[in-house]
Amino acid sequence: MAQIDLIVIHSISLPPGQYGGDDVERLFTNQLDWCQHPYFQQIKELQVSAHFYVRRNGELLQFVSCDDRAWHAGASLYRGRNNCNDDSIGIELEGVEGQSFEAAQYETLIAVCASLAQHYPVRHVAGHEHIAPGRKADPGSGFNWVLLQQSLAWPDQYFPE
């Protein structure tokens, strides 16, 4: 088994830009009604999962054990390694790439990252945009990397340039 040393931060909302429903949960548990919204037809063939999902209010949901692989990264490359699903934990924030996230989400994210670092040799935190540049753009420019780094007090080399 690969050693978990990377946390990947994503953003998601379903349908895009709509918050508060249970469609993301349904997607990650293979229960999404593909006919419920026209956008869902575009993602019908995706096979995705994430370890964690943080709602706008900071509520934390877990879908996959951290000891198991989740399918959140897709085709990816980071720190000289391909297939980031093999050695990373994926955290989805309810939101849209490029837009800001809520204080409650950062509080939960910081707590989860700190907890993960107590159980795994975490040495890298990156956005989906960093592990799949050109293909993905989340969490995007609205994500506050400085706040995350300062709150965790982790060294610069743990974070994207």
Image: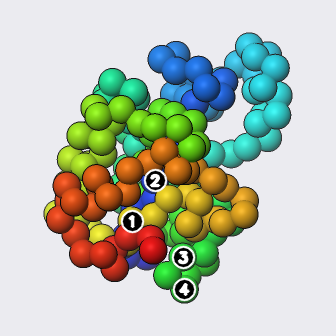
Asked whether disc 3 touches disc 1, contact meaning CB atoms under 8 Å apart, the reply is no
Pointer 1 residue: 125
Q: Distance between the residues labelled 3 and 1?
A: 10 Å
Spatial separation of the CA atoms under disc 2 and disc 4: 18 Å
Q: Which amino acid does label 1 sit on?
A: Val
**Marks 4/3: CA distance?**
5 Å
Give the percent coordinates (x, y) of residue 157. 34, 79
Local packing at callout 3 (Cα closer than 10 Å; few below 14, some 14-19, many 20+) is some
State which tag comes first along the sequence, 3 or 2: 2
Q: Earlier in the sequence, mark 2 or mark 4?
A: 2
Name the amino acid, label 4: Gly
| Residue corresponding to mark 3 | 78
Of label 1 and label 2, which has the lower sequence position?
2
Q: Do the residues labelled 3 and 2 touch (CB within 8 Å)?
A: no
* Circle 4: element type: loop
Mark 1 vs 2: CB contact within 8 A: yes
Name the residue type under label 3.
Tyr
Labelled pair 4, 1 in contact (Cβ < 8 Å): no
Question: Which residue sits at x=60%, y=75%?
Answer: 77
Mark 2: secondary structure: strand
Q: As drawn, is 147 to the left or to the right of 51?
A: left
Q: Is residue 91 above or below residue 121?
A: above
Q: Are marks 4 and 3 in contact (CB under 8 Å)?
A: yes
Q: Which mark is residue 80?
A: 4
* Residue located at (25% from left, 49% from top): 110
Q: Residue shown at 30%/42% (left/top)?
A: 106
Label 2, on which residue? 9
Pinpoint residue 63: horizontal percent, then vertical percent: 43, 39
Q: Which amino acid does label 2 sit on?
A: Ile
Q: Residue at x 61, y 26 (%)?
A: 17
